[in-house]
Image (cartoon, helix red, strand yellow):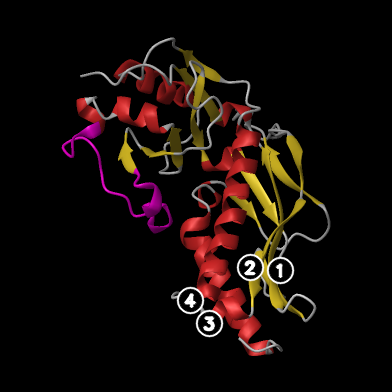
């Protein structure tokens, strides 16, 4: 890396950052409703209410459904993840320093996206069940039932997040663990989360859930349309939500590699996000 970074190098680096971000940076971004290329610091997600069909007399007028329209506002926040790369250190390390910094920055921003989505999901007012014990088959069924009660579509867009301990507890349930009951997944962006499909829900574990490691862990079951994430396009490329900036500082004899994004999450429909509380300190059933 020379003391003057070329435009082609920066473009290549930005591409690498974006690829890493999409591949392993965030588990949840692809599981929610998205609104990229936002102009400004806020955006809205529209919620359209349920319509009711009616009859009419011969030659009579049709009664309009008058479906409600509600705009859910989502505020974007700016985040940065930067680090120094000393010029002489580049000759001493045995790995690709550029790749390492790109991976670290992209993963940091990806974790921030997941944190924002989980914070928004945690504002739901729908709780399926509160248990003082470990995850059981009945608890999982009740959580899915809660979505059914709220008329949440069974369209392949249901997801569930369990803490690592809750996941271990669930793996002792035959129907959850056995390949005779679960289906494969055609969602390549979730491979890092090792999902499994059961009861029409894509289940995966996540370490960012509220209450992890306590007696009141909040596991989630939700529909893609119930949560939203808005983001600005960076790097001058539409659809790319993470950008990078590399500058040389002669007084430090180092490059400062900065990664940035602007985005925000919001809860669109509370009935589509169900909490399932469990004891995250309970022993794994034998």
Q: Earlier in the sequence, mark 2 or mark 1?
A: 1
Marks 1/3: CA–CA distance: 31 Å
- The local secondary structure at tag 2 comes to loop
Discs 4/1, front: 4
Q: Name the residue tied to disc 4.
A: 96
- The local secondary structure at tag 3 comes to helix
Q: Residue at image x 44%, y 76%?
A: 94
Discs 4/3, front: 3
Q: Earlier in the sequence, mark 1 or mark 3?
A: 3
Marks 2/3: CA–CA distance: 32 Å
Q: Is residue 53 left or right of residue 164?
A: right
Residue 248 falls in which quadrant of the image?
bottom right
Q: Are marks 2 and 3 in contact (CB under 8 Å)?
A: no
Q: Name the residue tied to disc 1.
A: 234
Give the percent coordinates (x, y) of residue 51. 63, 32
Q: Earlier in the sequence, mark 4 or mark 1?
A: 4
Crowd class of label 4 (few under 14; some 14 to 19; many from 20; radius 10 Å): few
Give the percent coordinates (x, y) of residue 259. 67, 65
Q: Name the residue tied to disc 3.
A: 91
Q: Are marks 4 and 3 in contact (CB under 8 Å)?
A: no
Crowd class of label 3 (few under 14; some 14 to 19; many from 20; radius 10 Å): few
Marks 4/1: CA–CA distance: 25 Å
Crowd class of label 1 (few under 14; some 14 to 19; many from 20; radius 10 Å): some
In the image shown, does 92 or 210 lie closer to the viewer? 92
In the image shown, does 141 or 255 lie closer to the viewer? 255
Q: Quadrant of the C terminus?
A: top left
Looking at the rendering, the stretch of residues picked out in magenta corresponds to 177-195
117 lies above or below 139: below
- The local secondary structure at tag 1 comes to loop
- Disc on res. 240: 2
């Amino acid at each position: 890396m020379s003391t003057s970074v070329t435009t082609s190098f920066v473009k290549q680096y930005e591409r690498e950052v974006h690829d890493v971000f999409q591949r392993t940076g965030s588990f949840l971004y692809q599981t929610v409703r998205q609104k990229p290329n936002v102009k400004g610091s806020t955006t809205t997600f529209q919620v359209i209410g349920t319509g009711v069909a009616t009859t009419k007399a011969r030659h009579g007028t049709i009664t309009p459904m008058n479906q409600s329209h509600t705009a859910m506002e989502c505020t974007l926040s700016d985040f940065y993840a930067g680090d120094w790369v000393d010029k002489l250190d580049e000759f001493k390390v045995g790995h690709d320093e550029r790749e390492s910094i790109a991976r670290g920055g992209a993963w940091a921003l990806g974790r921030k996206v997941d944190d924002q989505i989980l914070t928004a999901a945690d504002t739901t007012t729908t709780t399926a069940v509160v248990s003082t014990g470990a995850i059981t088959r009945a608890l999982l069924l009740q959580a899915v039932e809660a979505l059914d009660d709220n008329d949440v579509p069974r369209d392949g867009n249901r997801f569930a997040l369990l803490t690592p301990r809750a996941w271990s507890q669930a793996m002792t349930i035959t129907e959850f663990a056995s390949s005779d009951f679960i289906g494969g997944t055609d969602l390549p962006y979730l491979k890092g989360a090792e999902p499994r499909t059961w009861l029409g829900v894509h289940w995966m574990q996540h370490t960012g859930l509220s209450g992890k490691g306590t007696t009141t862990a909040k596991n989630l079951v939700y529909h893609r349309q119930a949560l939203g994430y808005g983001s600005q396009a960076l790097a001058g490329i539409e659809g790319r939500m993470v950008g990078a900036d590399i500058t040389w500082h002669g007084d430090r004899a180092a490059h400062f590699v900065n990664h940035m994004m602007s985005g925000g999450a919001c809860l669109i429909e509370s009935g589509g996000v169900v909490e399932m509380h469990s004891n995250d300190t309970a022993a794994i059933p034998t």
